[in-house]
Every structure is written in structure tokens, then in C-alpha cells.
Amino acid sequence: MTTVLFDGPAPVINALCEQLGVRRILDTALRWDKEQCLLSPGQRIVVLLINVLLSRQPLYRVQDMFYQMDAEKLFGRGIDWKCLNDDALVRSLDKLAEADPEKVYQALVLEVLNAEGVTVDALHVDTTSVSVHGEYDLDDDETALNVTFGFSKDNRPDLKQFMYGLGVTRSGGLSQLLHDLGRASPFMT
């Protein structure tokens, strides 16, 4: 019986991640043991990126998505869809959380900007606030989203909110997503 595998655009996404150095940067920034890992954390996170861009399967079903693909061709000799299970993927996300995710993200952004020749001599930033409801048990974790009362752009000072913004370069290149401006924003009281 012949098995037909359909990779779709996954090889293009994988090659783009390789060209931009995503796996290399993640593997350098995250703690891991090369002797014990069949796939590096960077490779596993690229698997998650491919999933998000192609099918947005929940974590426990990512492995199923790769069942129809040639995982060995995508990720290297000896790698099949069984290697892409949710336990292995979660371990990579845990390693990303243990590292400083903002620094890892900044390293990725700087690498992409450099690779694409995008200059950041001028940066245009726009922020917005998102109103939320409910109780939030936020500990003193500096990486936690800052949900608080303050100046509300939608004139609802009675609601808690968080702020985020997007920065683009003069040429229109996306340079950085700022996910939590609550502590640094002059608009918060």
C-alpha cells in the first residue's frame, strides 16, 4: 500500500524560519541538553509556528497535523510525527518561559530586521487599551500582564485594562509588538 504525504506550505515556513535564524536563536537562548533531545527546543517551537500558521490545532492535536506530512524531510533524519507530541512541545514552551521571553523575542526581531535590511532610524508606535472584566490574581511576576485601572482611551475608567502597542519602521516593516505598556505608559495612573 502506498502512503501519500502532503506537506503543503510547511516546507516553505520551515525554510523561512531557518533562513531567519529562528531555530538557531532559540536553541542558543534556551537551556537544553543536546545529548538527551532528539529535537531541539527551537525545532519544536518552529513546529508550533507551522501549526499556528497552517491549522491552529490545539496543542494535543499538533502531532496529528504532522501525521499527513513527511516530518523527516521537514525536520531531519529519524524524526517522525510521533516525535511531535504535546509533552515534547510543552517542554519547549516551558524552556522558553524559563528563559527571558522578552529578550528572546527581541533577539528574534533584531535578527529578522538585520537579515531583511530593515533600518529603525525612525519608529512609529501606536498604543491602545483593552478593557477587561473580572478578578485577576496577579502575583509579583514582572512578566505578568499588568491589568489595572487608569486612563481609559474608551472613557471607561471604571474598568480594568491593559495596554499594548505596535511599532513599525518608516518603511512599514513590523519591528516589535509591545505586549504590556501598563507599567511604563504615561497614560496610566
Image (cartoon, helix red, strand yellow):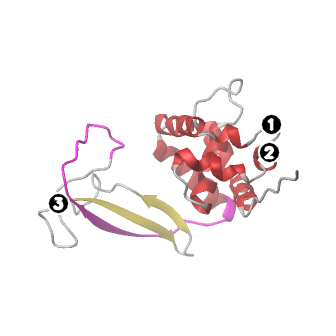
Q: Is residue 15 magenta?
A: no
Query: Is residue 126 found inside the magenta-colored segment of the image?
Result: yes
Answer whether residue 110 is visible to the viewer in this image: no
In this view, the residue farthest toward the top is 35
Q: Residue at 53% x, 35% y: name it.
A: 95
- For the residues labelled 3 and 1, the Cα–Cα distance comes to 54 Å
The residue that label 1 is drawn on is 78
Q: Residue furthest bottom?
A: 171
- What kind of element bears circle 1? loop
* Residue 87 found in image quarter: top right
Q: Give the extent of the magenta segment.
A: 115-144
How packed mark 1 is, by other alpha carbons closer than 10 Å (few <14, some 14-19, many 20 or more), is few
Residue pictured at 71% horizontal, 49% vertical: 67
Instruction: Give the x, y percent position of residue 117.
Output: 67, 65
- Label 3: how many Cα within 10 Å (few below 14, some 14–19, many 20+): some
Q: Which mark is residue 150?
A: 3
Q: What type is the residue that disc 1 sits on?
A: Gly
Q: Earlier in the sequence, mark 3 or mark 1?
A: 1
Image quarter (top left, top right, bottom left or bottom right) of the C terminus: bottom left
Q: Looking at the picture, how far across and down is residue 160, in whole percent?
A: 19, 58
Left or right position of 68 against 132: right
Q: Which residue is located at x 56 percent, y 70 percent? A: 173
Local secondary structure at mark 2: helix
What residue is disc 2 on? Answer: 72
Q: Residue 16's spot in the image, x, y percent?
A: 71, 59
Please give left or right for residue 144 compared with residue 61 in the image.
left
Image location of residue 131, percent across then percent down: 24, 64
Q: Are marks 2 and 1 in contact (CB under 8 Å)?
A: yes
